[in-house]
Image (spheres, rainbow, N blue to C red):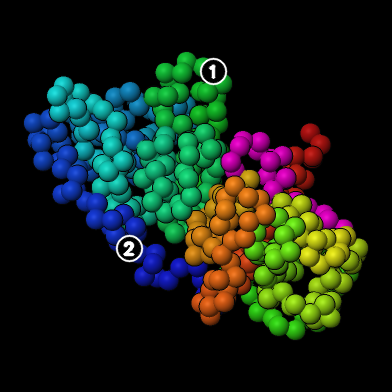
Amino acid sequence: MTGFFTKQETKIDNFSVKKRGFSCYSCGLYKNDINCPNPKMEPFGQFKKGIMNIGSFTSFQDDQLSKPFQGSENYIYHVYNKLGIDIEKDCININAVRCFTYDKETGKSRIPTAKEISCCQLNIFRIIQQYKPKLIVLFGKIALTSVIGSRWKKSLEGIDKWRGFIIPDQELKCWIAPVFLPSFVQQSNRVEVANIFEKDLKNALAILDKEFPVYQEPTINYITDLSVLEQIPNNAMIAFDYETTGLKPYAKSHKIVCCSVATDEDNVYVFTMPNEIEKREPFINLLNNKYIKKFSHNMKFEETWSWVKLKTRVKSWYHDAMLAAHILDNRTGITNLKFQTYVNFGIIDYSSTVEPYLQAIDEKNANSMNRLLEYFATPEGKKETLKYCAYDSINEYRLAMKQMKEFELLTLPF
């Protein structure tokens, strides 16, 4: 089984920022040496502990002293010092926009435009490739946009959604820790915000002692004869996932297109759902087996489709990874499987080829058909859909196992 990305696709020069044609030349901030005496600011610091700090944009003070975090962001010095880190000796420091962003009329600092952030992204990725940090700390939304935004295919939303996660990014081969902007923490003048900021940085620094986890590709077994599912032993645990023609199964035209069954963290079966009842009987028996525990991500989806389209209930539900994600962290917008897969395992995209076909044709109608059957009818579409379905199950299984370990830690006696 091949990986998510080819070597060519993961080369820094091949990131989407270059494809859009953004560059220093198209930005032009570097040209005005009167207002920007130190353009294209180079990274600053001795980098002894492998920490890379990426701030938002270059302030007037940064530009004058030719190093980041000298203006309103200098609060970071205080917090890092408190945590035993010398920011200039232990870290390498850079801003997401390396040139001083100023208002042409006043000459004063301003927030960079989306274009200016995009124009600097390729430089940031090259710096990451050059230094190969163990840990990248992203301070605020602009840094988040620079490093994650060009690769994340969905809405990035705000830093509130991302702060606190320590992500084993498999493309960049390092940990990524988004945190609040230092100036925001200081200006908020709220103890709880300062405590969260310090805690997030402390947790991020603790990860330096851990080995970076390389994502292990699962073994995907593409099957047409479902009798192999009968070999799954009692007392086993499985995760299963459907790809369907819509969100709700009640319209007669809807169907389950394919299904995957992960039997452990490294092995998964995937198959086109047979139309004939006798051919899908081994899978129905699996769902009915009360001795085999079932995982899913939003189990009501699989439960409803199983009942309406397969005429069976699912016995022995054991773990819902979506509900567990909400219990572990009740922020909105973070329980989606793709988000959880990235923040927990570092895989930033495995769904973008298929997901456009999963969107309802009529978004206002919950029973609307999508275009999955159209895509599945092509050889490439069938291949990509089955692979996508398989990754859903394997990531659900891995996430469930990780969550259960976290719940065990939460319930340990003091």
Q: Quadrant of residue 266?
A: bottom right
C-alpha separation, residue under disc 1 versus residue under disc 2:
43 Å
Q: Is residue 177 left or right of residue 122?
A: right
Based on the picture, tell me whether residue 321 belongs to the magenta stretch. Answer: yes
Q: Is residue 392 left or right of residue 349?
A: right
> Residue 14, labelled with which disc?
2
Based on the picture, tell me whether residue 37 belongs to the magenta stretch. Answer: no
Q: Position of residue 115 (x, y in %)?
A: 27, 43
Q: Farthest residue toward the bottom?
A: 225
Relative to 106, does residue 139 appear above or below in the rendering? Answer: below
Q: Farthest residue toward the left?
A: 34
Magenta residues span: 316-334
Q: Amino acid at mark 2?
A: Asn
Q: Is residue 52 left or right of residue 308?
A: left
Q: Position of residue 301 (x, y in %)?
A: 73, 55
Q: Position of residue 32 (x, y in %)?
A: 10, 36
- Judge by depth and name the residue closer to the eye, 375 or 3: 375
Q: Amino acid at mark 1?
A: Val
Query: What residue lies at 40% left-to-right and 70% top-to-bottom?
Result: 7
Query: What residue lies at 83% left-to-right and 60% top-to-bottom?
Result: 307
> Residue 191, labelled with which disc?
1
Relative to 222, does residue 324 appear above or below in the rendering? Answer: above
How packed mark 2 is, by other alpha carbons closer than 10 Å (few <14, some 14-19, many 20 or more), is: few
- Judge by depth and name the residue closer to the eye, 285 or 210: 285
- Judge by depth and name the residue closer to the eye, 258 or 71: 258
